[in-house]
C-alpha cells in the first residue's frame, strides 16, 4: 500500500471518529475537546474526510499498472469486437491489427482502447454502453471522428483534431452514459 493511501485512511478514520464523538456514539475524552463551535468542526471534519478520500483515490489513479492489459478479444473477420468490464480496468492496444468496430460495455469500471496502431481502412462504429464508469479512446490522427451521445450526468469529451479530412475513414462513436464519461484523444 502506498504512503499516500495510508495517510488518506488515517484522515478518513480520524474524521469519522470525531464525527461519532460529536453525535454521542463514542465517548472518548481525547476527541471530545473543543465542541463549542459545531459548524466549524463539521467543516473541519468535511475537509479532513475530503482530503482522505482524495489521497486514497489519487494513490491508485496515478498507478500506471492499474490497467490490466488484455489481448485483443477474438472476433470473426468483419465482425465487431466486444469488450465488457465490471469493477476493474482493462486496456486493449492494437498493434497493426485490422479494426472492424467494437461494442464497449462498462459497469463501475474503466476501459482504455488504443487504436493508434490499428489498421482502419473504411468507416467503423464503436457502440458504447457506460454505467458509472469511464472509457478512454485513443484514435489515429488520420481518421475523422463523429460522436453521437445520450448521457445522464455524464458526457463525451472529444479532444481530437476536428479538421475533416476528405477521403479519410470515419469512426462513428455512439455513446450511452449513465453517471459516466468517455474521453476521445488522438495524441
Image (cartoon, grey):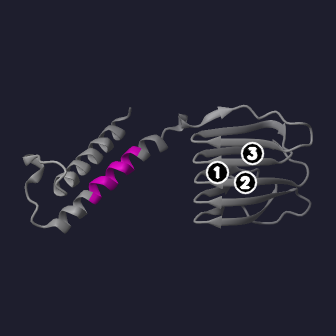
| Pair 3/1: label in front | 1
Instruction: Tell me the crowding category of disc 3: few under 14, some 14 to 19, or many 20 or more residues within 10 angstroms, Cα based.
Output: many
Q: Earlier in the sequence, mark 2 or mark 3?
A: 3
Q: Is residue 72 left or right of residue 124?
A: left
Question: Where residue 128 is drawn, which disc sits there?
Answer: 2
The quarter of the rendered structure image containing the N terminus is: top left
State yes or no: residue 47 in magenta.
Answer: yes
Q: Is residue 78 above or below residue 23?
A: above
Q: Residue at x 27, y 45 (%)?
A: 13
Which label's residue is closer to the chain start, 1 or 2? 2
Residue depicted at x 62% and y 54%? 131
Residue 132 visible: yes
Disc with the residue nearer the chain's start (3 vs 1): 3
Query: Which span of residues is magenta-colored?
Result: 46-56
Disc 1, disc 2: CB below 8 Å? yes
Task: Give the percent coordinates (x, y) of residue 158.
Answer: 68, 62
**Residue matched to label 3:** 116
Q: Nearer the viewer, mark 1 or mark 2?
A: 2
Question: In the depicted view, which residue is nearer to us: 91 or 31?
Answer: 31
Residue 52 sits inside the magenta stretch = yes
Callout 1: 10 Å neighbours few (<14), some, many (20+)? many
Q: Which residue is mark 1?
A: 135
Q: CA distance from mark 3 to mark 1?
A: 16 Å
Residue 114's x, y, as percent? Answer: 71, 44
Q: Residue 70, relative to residue 102: is it above or below?
A: above
Horizontal side of 12 relative to 176 (left or right) equals: left
Where disc 2 sits, the SS reads strand
Secondary structure of the residue carrying tag 3 is strand
Residue in the picture at 34% in, 55% down: 50
Q: Residue at x 43, y 46 (%)?
A: 57
Amino acid at each position: 500500500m502506498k504512503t499516500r493511501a495510508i495517510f488518506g485512511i488515517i484522515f478518513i478514520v480520524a474524521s469519522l471518529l470525531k464525527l461519532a464523538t460529536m453525535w454521542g456514539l463514542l465517548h472518548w475524552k481525547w476527541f471530545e475537546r473543543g465542541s463549542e463551535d459545531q459548524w466549524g468542526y463539521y467543516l473541519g471534519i468535511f475537509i479532513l474526510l475530503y482530503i482522505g478520500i482524495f489521497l486514497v483515490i489519487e494513490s491508485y489513479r496515478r498507478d500506471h499498472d492499474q490497467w490490466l492489459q488484455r489481448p485483443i478479444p477474438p472476433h470473426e473477420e468483419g465482425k465487431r469486437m466486444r469488450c465488457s468490464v465490471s469493477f476493474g480496468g482493462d486496456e486493449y492496444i492494437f498493434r497493426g491489427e485490422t479494426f472492424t468496430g467494437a461494442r464497449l460495455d462498462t459497469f463501475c469500471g474503466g476501459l482504455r482502447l488504443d487504436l493508434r496502431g490499428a489498421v482502419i481502412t473504411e468507416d467503423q462504429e464503436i457502440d458504447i454502453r457506460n454505467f458509472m464508469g469511464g472509457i478512454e479512446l485513443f484514435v489515429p490522427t488520420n481518421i475523422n471522428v463523429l460522436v453521437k451521445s445520450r448521457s445522464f450526468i455524464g458526457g463525451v469529451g472529444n479532444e481530437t483534431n476536428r479538421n475533416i479530412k476528405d477521403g479519410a475513414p470515419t469512426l462513428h462513436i455512439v455513446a450511452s452514459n449513465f453517471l459516466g464519461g468517455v474521453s476521445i484523444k488522438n495524441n
